[in-house]
Amino acid sequence: MGESKEYMTLPEENGSINISEEVIAAIAVGAVRDVEGVSGMMTAMGGSVTDLVTNKKNAQKVAKGVKIDMTGAALVLDIYLTVEYGHPIPEVAENAQKAVIGAVEAMTGCSVEAVNIHVGGVTLA
């Protein structure tokens, strides 16, 4: 059946709902891109080129600029982004955290424990 994906499982009365980590990452990216001062997404700084080549699943998560930890009861997301020059980085990061938490919790019903923002650059344009 192809590669195995990680899912966040929400038990319901009539069964369960499984939400793929790719869906959660897409929601987070969409929320971050709407934040004023965010100029783009970056690849995660922890991964090496070898990881990108040998682990397709990891490469997909890294390419989106989102790393998701679903091991606990709540989600922990690491967001890697760049900020437009002239915008206060702490303010942009806080707004990005709020946007991601709001969007992920509203669209999935999953609890978000933390959103860690990693600013890896400033764009001048």
Image (cartoon, rainbow, N blue to C red):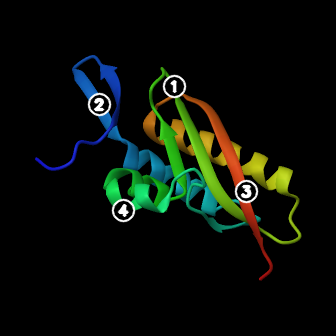
Q: Position of residue 122 (x, y in %)?
A: 78, 69
Q: Earlier in the sequence, mark 4 or mark 3?
A: 4
List the single residue furthest toward the front: 50
Foreground mark, 2 or 4?
Answer: 4
Q: Position of residue 37 (x, y in %)?
A: 77, 65
Residue 38 bears which disc, if any? none
Q: Residue visible at 60% across and 64% down?
A: 41
State how far apart marks 3 and 1 are (Cα). Answer: 23 Å
SS of the residue at dot 1? Answer: loop
Name above or below for residue 39 compared with residue 29: below
SS of the residue at dot 3? Answer: strand
Q: Earlier in the sequence, mark 3 or mark 1?
A: 1
Asked if the residues shown at circle 3 and circle 1 are in contact, with their CB atoms under 8 angstroms apart, the answer is no
Q: Which residue is mark 1?
A: 74
Q: Residue visible at 47% across and 50% down?
A: 25
Asked if the residues shown at circle 2 and circle 4 are in contact, with their CB atoms under 8 angstroms apart, the answer is no
Foreground mark, 2 or 1?
Answer: 1
Foreground mark, 4 or 3?
Answer: 4
Q: Residue visible at 21% across and 48% down?
A: 3
Q: Which residue is mark 2?
A: 17
Could you tell me which quadrant the C terminus lies in?
bottom right
Residue 11 sits in quarter: top left
Q: Position of residue 92 (x, y in %)?
A: 79, 55
Q: Amino acid at mark 4?
A: Val
Q: Position of residue 44 (x, y in %)?
A: 57, 55
Q: Which residue is mark 3?
A: 119
Foreground mark, 2 or 3?
Answer: 3
Q: Amino acid at mark 3?
A: Val
